[in-house]
Amino acid sequence: MSEKKKQQIKNRKLHDSSSKIIFGNAELCSQFLRNYMDMPILKDVRAEDIEDVSERYVPMFTEERNSDTVKRVKISKNNILYFISLIEHKAKVDYNVCMQLLRYMVYIWEDYEKSMEKQHKGISKTKDFKYPPILPIVYYEGTGEWTAVLNLKDRIFFDSAFEAFTPTFFYKLIQLNKYSVEDLIEKNDELSLVMLINRLQSTKEFRNLNLPEDYLKNLSEQSTDELLDIIGKVVEAMLRHLKVPEEEVEGFTDQIKERKMGELFECFKDIDLPAARKKAMEKGLAEGRAAGIAEGREVGKAEGRAEGRAEGEELLLIKIICKKLSKNMDTAQIVRELEIDESRIQKIIRVAKDFAPEYDIEQIQNRLK
């Protein structure tokens, strides 16, 4: 696989992970509906009104949609609004997204019909039977303009001649790059900060992101531990995308959990990334050389250096994995964040668990040998 293809896959996983985090949390999802849909009917939606039913519907879809979510939203005492969020994170715009969404909506309506029929045989054939409304959403985080049509009829031949017989179907487009920094800050909620972070494409943009002190102070003090943890994960994914050294990443995310978000952004402006990357590499090589000296004397200096580097890299990987295990992260989370061969990570985790909770790094490395 080419390096370009690997990077595209890595970027897609990063964005899919971010969207899952956003829409997987009821509080962030309620903020999204209240503050970004511009629909009066949703202005009072709260986290407790939202139920995630993705597991019920996503398997019905004919394609693998890792980042899609389906929510059942209560908008009044007796009414339920279903909405689909279809998250597209591609280098090129998906021009068939309106047809995909329509397909998914039909799946949901068919499932609703079957459910009602089980309760009342023949009810779907009655005059007053109605299907629940569905709000289809495309949340686009790409840097370019979204140029796909919003109306299904524009994908149909002879749309004017057959307009009366063609469904008129629009989806709601949320294009992240259309919001200015000021627009998002004005929302003054946790989702606005997550969206600001997801906008960043380079370390330069991160350094130039001047956020008001009271905005960060308010979020640091008022956010729940769960939301701070989510913000930390989004920042962690973004920093890795920017190739920030692992030790620096963990230091920055710890500041979020300690409710010091203002310090996080100030500290990032001061860090010399090239120097930090060089230091991290030199440290790994130094540890590798130290571990490989003894064997290097026997097999030759060249082989010793090579083995030393390999052992140093392994030692650093073991340290990182053990630190994540100590935070009660599971194997799937670690694999997703490190993006290293899963079998290699599983092998280290199996051995490391025998040394919990202290995690003696050298003993783990010796056992792995």
Image: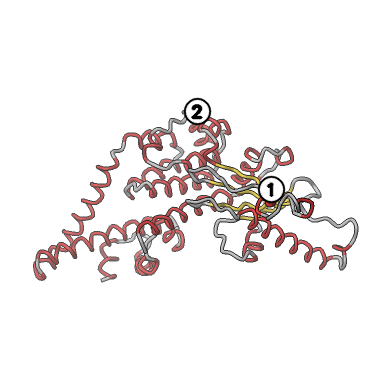
Residue at mark 2 to residue at mark 1: CA–CA distance? 39 Å
Image spot of residue 336 (x, y percent): 44, 59
- Judging by the rendered image, the residue that carries numbered circle 2 is 214
Q: Secondary structure at mark 2?
A: helix
Q: Is residue 284 left or right of residue 320?
A: left
Image spot of residue 40 (x, y percent): 73, 37
Q: Secondary structure at mark 1?
A: loop
Nearer the observer, 284 or 19: 19
Residue drawn 71% across and 50% down? 169
Image spot of residue 1 (x, y percent): 37, 64
Residue drawn 29% across and 61% down? 361
Mark 2 residue type: Asp
Quarter holding the C terminus is bottom left
Mark 1 residue type: Phe
Mark 2 or 1, closer to the camera: 1
Image spot of residue 61 (x, y percent): 63, 64
Query: Which color scheme does this rendered protein use?
Result: secondary structure
Residue drawn 38% across and 35% down? 207
Q: Residues within 10 Å of mark 2 (few under 14, many from 20)?
A: few
- Judging by the rendered image, the residue that carries numbered circle 1 is 170
Q: Residues within 10 Å of mark 1 (few under 14, many from 20)?
A: some
Going from N to C along the chain, the mark reached first, 2 or 1, is: 1
